[in-house]
Amino acid sequence: MLVSMLAIEARNSFFLASSLQLPASIRVSRTTNVLLHFHFSSLRQMNFALKFATLEISRRAIRLAKKKGRFLTGLISVVFTTSLLIVAGCDGSASVEEPNEMVLRHVLYTRIKGLDPGNMRDVYSVIVGSQIFESLYQYHFLKRPYELVPLLAEDMPQISEDLLTYTIRIKKGVYFQDDRCFTGGKGRELKAEDFVFSLKRVADIKYLSQNWSIFDNKIVGLDEFREYTKNCSSAEDVDYSRQVEGLTAPDDYTLVIKLKKPPQDGQAHWPQLCTALADISTAPVAKEAVDYYGKDIISHPVGTGPFKLNVWRRGSYIELVRNPAFRGELYPSEGEDGDAEAGYLDDAGKPIPFADRVLWTIINERQPAWLLFLQGKVDATVIPKDSFDEVMTGTGELTPEMKQRNIRLKTFRDPSTYWVGFNMADDVLSRNKPLRRAISYAIDREKFIELFFNNRHLVAHGLIPPVMPSYNPGIKEKGYTRYDPEKAKELLKEAEKIHGGTLPRLKIAMPGTDTWYRQFGQFLKRNLDTVGLEVEMQYMDRPTYQERVNTKSAQMFSSGTSASIPDAQDFLSMFYSKYQTPGRNKFNYSNPDFDRLYEKAQVLPDSGERRRLYQRMELIALEDCPAALLNHRVAYVLHHDWYKNYKQHAFAYGLSKYRRIDMAKRTAYKN
């Protein structure tokens, strides 16, 4: 079996080298010799041989590039990435796949910092963490419009007549996964007190959670608990047994949440509570795990979900395996019109999860991920910009080659907005609105979308995406994000007067070091150079980037967000002054008029009045220009036809439990 595995890797290495058009001397070098001339008795020997073989390709590619006087960044990155994939695949459980084992195979385009739900906000961490952790509620997988349903809760909450007290019954028979943090290594049953502990933890100022903004000024006594933690000398001194009136567990299976009294009679103070309780930040974390692992809890997730962490090789891959302690769940038996015809109800009523393992390979470059997808080693992928013509015809359909491979296309408008943000705590940017406006006018968004997204995305004329009910259809006419380099030049003259002389070089933090981000950075730099602004692009991995932004150390930064709920609150809360870093307001923006409207909207149910307030807040922020908005994403996702139950969902991430692999089709494709 080992020899056959090596033959496959030899073939793939040769294919890679050929596809990169390396010289024949490299393509037929030691890779073939090593793989074909030795028989191996162990995975360790095989791993050593593959390391030697694939790194030989890398070394020779680098020598060739230097010899020709140019550094082929993309080429070398592809070679190194593939080397990493081969080595990782032969040196651990992430590759040794049993014949009947069902494995979901995905790609992450960046490293993640940690898997601690109380402090997770970036989409990549949430994607992985949502397979391990669960919240009280979740969005129904199939129904549209989106509907909240119980997950760890027994049913929807009982709400008092004054709308201030929520009583939630917790499901019995839910267990944390087995882990050495528990007595005897056996996971214990979930209790209501676990939710109390976890929410207090988010409030703890020593924890520095990015998610505090969700609960700020809403639950009776929780803000006071946060103030108490400020006076504790260390995190270890915080007493989590300290009572919070609005968070109690009268018994093991009952959670009671009391909201602060509304400022106006007849209004609920927090009508969005249930949507907040579907957020991963509210997932229960066992106190035993926090006490046992301390700060290293970010690398040791202990949840109640269908999967648990098995292997995490930072920068290489993350592997989850089925959680034997999972209580079990059934695939939905109802959905929206058309779901039955689309095959989304074929598994109705069956126990989930279907998969035995979930594997994310971390690949910074899009092209190697695309090659793996075509080889059948990844189940689904986005379309790389340089491969778009290979995939799509001029009429917006899949090419005959893609159809012949039985590849499927899913498209949908994502509730997202992306931008170049301005740190309003920065001395240069904060007091110079003409400078910020000039930067915004200097960016050619339509060209950006053409070059980097094959004209698939939409220009962001405002904060709120078009798919949201509160979207302002007239926002484009305001012209806040128009491309006007001449206007930018005029504003820069005014900006220099405000600054008192020549403007300094500005710095833009980029959350990636791969080819895509470098090309994006070059595009921004060219746009700003054209109007006379000198900028320095700073490329870094995502954990470093997050640290810079969360400590107000990034002057400007490329970022974006997708809504976690079917409401524009996620986009507007980013500009509320009380949520400045490390909270959601990474811009460190402050405007009293905005804050006043935000606080008023918080106590309103979903209504025309609330949506109108959202639009007024949006205009205030756009006028102040704390960001140069760029685009709204339109997702084009490809998946193999063996990847079943792949229905797009805008707000849910814990979807691996629903996915299923048609093993026969996958095998036939690879052969």
Image: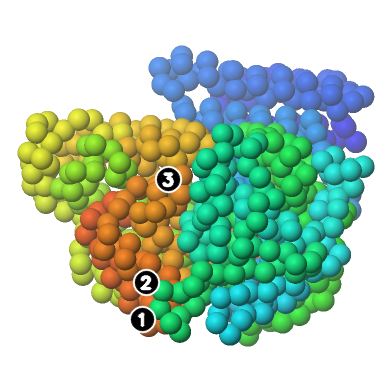
Report the Cα–Cα distance between label 3 and label 2: 22 Å
Q: How is the image coloured?
A: rainbow
Left or right: residue 217 versus residue 315 is: left
Front residue of 359 and 272 = 272
The amino acid beneath tag 2 is: Lys
Front residue of 56 and 465 = 465
Q: Secondary structure at mark 2?
A: helix
Q: Residues within 10 Å of mark 1 (few under 14, many from 20)?
A: few
Q: Quadrant of the N terminus?
A: top right
Q: Residues within 10 Å of mark 2 (few under 14, many from 20)?
A: some
Q: Is residue 631 above or below residue 13?
A: below
Task: Name the mark on residue 600.
Answer: 2
Residue that label 1 marks = 609
Disc 1 and disc 3 in contact, CB within 8 angstroms? no
Residue that label 3 marks = 581
Q: Earlier in the sequence, mark 2 or mark 1?
A: 2
The amino acid beneath tag 1 is: Glu
Q: Secondary structure at mark 1?
A: helix
Q: Earlier in the sequence, mark 3 or mark 2?
A: 3
Q: Residues within 10 Å of mark 3 (few under 14, many from 20)?
A: many
Which residue is at 37% across, 76% downward? Answer: 611
Q: Earlier in the sequence, mark 1 or mark 3?
A: 3
Which residue is at 46% across, 16% downward? Answer: 66
